[in-house]
Image: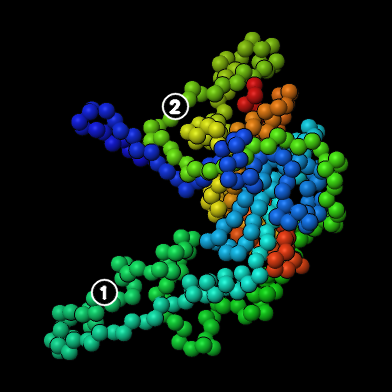
Amino acid sequence: MAPYDSDSSGGEEEEEYTETNVLLGYASQDPDDDTISRLGGRPEWLDPSSPPSAALARCKVCKDMMVLILQLNGGLPDQFPGHERRLYVFACRKKTCRRKDGNIRVLRAVRIAPGSKVVAAKKEEKKSAPAAKPEPKPISTNLGETLFGAKPIGSSMGSANPFATGSSSAAALSNPFASSANPFSKPAPAAEFKPADSKPEEEEEATTKEKIEEAAKADPPEPAEPWPAEKDMPAPYPVSYLPDPEYETLDPRPAPVPQAVQMDMDDPSSSAAGGGGGKEDKDVFESSMDADFQKFADRLAQNPEQVIRYEFRGQPLLYSKTDAVGQNLSTGRSMSRCGNCGGARVFEVQMTPHAIAELEAEELGLEGMDWGTVIVGVCDADCQARGVGEGEVGYVEEWAGVQWEELTMRR
C-alpha cells in the first residue's frame, strides 16, 4: 500500500492509490464494443459450425447440460501470437448438485492461424539467442599494474562487461515473464556439446508422453456427442456484458479492524450442567477462517462491483486457505497438469461473489449459487486439442477451482 503524502500547503492528506496488475471486469447492460465477454446467455463459439462436444458441458454429478455463467474473450497476442482464444465457464442449475465436484466446468477454445507456430518458434529462438560477444578492448600493457595488482587485468574494458547491471537488453525488456534467462550468456563452445544434465530428445518426448498419459488417466476424455439444440438446453442466465476492464486500484488507507466474529453455539450438555465453561463455550472466534475471508472481503470491498479478476500467470485472491483448493494454492502446490498436453497450468481469471448477484438478478428465490469464488487455471502453453489442425477450432477442458461459501457465514 502506498503511504500518505501530506500536503504541506493545505494541511490535508493527499492519498496515492496503488494500481495492481489485476484487471477488473464490471457487469453492464451496455455491450459497448465488446459483445463477446459477458456473464450468462448462450455460448458464442469461435466457429458456430464447430461447437464442442456436449460431453464437455455436462454436469459430472447429474450428467445434465449446464448453463453458461462466464464467456471471456481471452486473446493474448503478446504471449500467443496468432491464437484466437475464448474461455467458457459452465455451472449446473440443479440445487442437488451444488457443492459437489464437477458441477462447474471450464472450457478453453483456441484457433491457431496457419503459420503461427513457425512465427512463435522463431520469436522464441530470437528471444533466447545469446547476444554477440563484444570485441574486447586492448588490455593495458603496464607491467607494474599487471604484476602488483594496481588494476586487475581487463579493468580498462569498463562498460564493455557484458554482465554489467547497467547493460540493457531488448529481449529481456520485451518479455516480462522471462525467468532467469540471461540474454548475454556465452554461446556453447561446440554445436555437439550438451550439458551433462540435459536429456536426449527421445527421453524428453517420452517424458511428455508420460505426462499426457498420467493426465489422461486422472481425467479421461469423454466420448464426443453433438451439441444439443437450444430447446433442449436448460434456461440460461440473463446476459450482462463486461466492457472496458480497468486495472485494480487500492486505497492506501488501512481497512478498519473488524469486530471479532462470534457465533452462538448450542450445547445441551453444557446447559444441563449449569452452564459450565461460561462465555468461552458460548462465544467462538473462528480465527483462521475469518482472517482469510476478511482479507478476501476487504480486497473486494475496495471495488465492490467487480465480477471478475483477470491476471494471466498471476495469483488468485483466495476466499479461504482451509479448504482443499486454498490449501493447495497457498502452500505452493500447483494446479493439476493439462489433461491435453501434460504441461503446467497457470491462473488466468476468477469470478467474484458479485457475479452471482448479476446472474441471479431475476431469480425470485434466495437459494441460488453459493460459491465464494471460481478460479480458472489454464494450460501455460495454450495447447491445441489433439487432432485439430491449424485454422481449426479446438476445445480443451481446463481446471476449475471452486471455493464454496462458508456455511457458518450465514448464521
Q: Amino acid at mark 2?
A: Val
**For this rendering, which residue is in front, 306 or 218?**
306
Q: Which residue is painted at 57% across and 15% down in the image?
A: 278
x%, y% of residue 81? 57, 64
Q: Is residue 125 visible?
A: yes
Give the answer, above or below, for where 31 lies relative to 180.
above
x%, y% of residue 396? 72, 57
The nearer-to-camera label among 1 and 2 is 1
Q: Residues within 10 Å of mark 1 (few under 14, many from 20)?
A: few
Q: Quadrant of residue 357?
A: top right
Which of the colour schemes (rainbow, by chain, secondary structure, one colour) is used?
A: rainbow
Question: Where does the C terminus fall, quadrant-wise?
Answer: top right
**For this rendering, which residue is in front, 229 or 280?**
229
Q: Which residue is painted at 33% across and 75% down in the image?
A: 162
Position of 109 compared to 126: left or right? Answer: right
Q: Quadrant of residue 205?
A: bottom right
Position of 306 compared to 2: left or right? Answer: right
**Helix, strand or loop under label 1:** helix
Give the answer, above or below, for where 333 lies relative to 388.
above
Position of 316 compared to 57: left or right? Answer: left
The residue where tag 2 is placed is: 257
Q: Which residue is painted at 47% across and 83% down in the image?
A: 188
Whole-Å distance between the Cαs marked 1 and 2? 52 Å
- Which of marks 2 and 1 precedes in the sequence? 1
**Helix, strand or loop under label 2:** loop
Q: Residues within 10 Å of mark 2 (few under 14, many from 20)?
A: few
**For this rendering, which residue is in front, 109 or 326?**
109
Q: Amino acid at mark 1?
A: Ser
The residue where tag 1 is placed is: 159
Give the answer, above or below, for where 383 lies relative to 254.
below
The circle on residue 408 is none
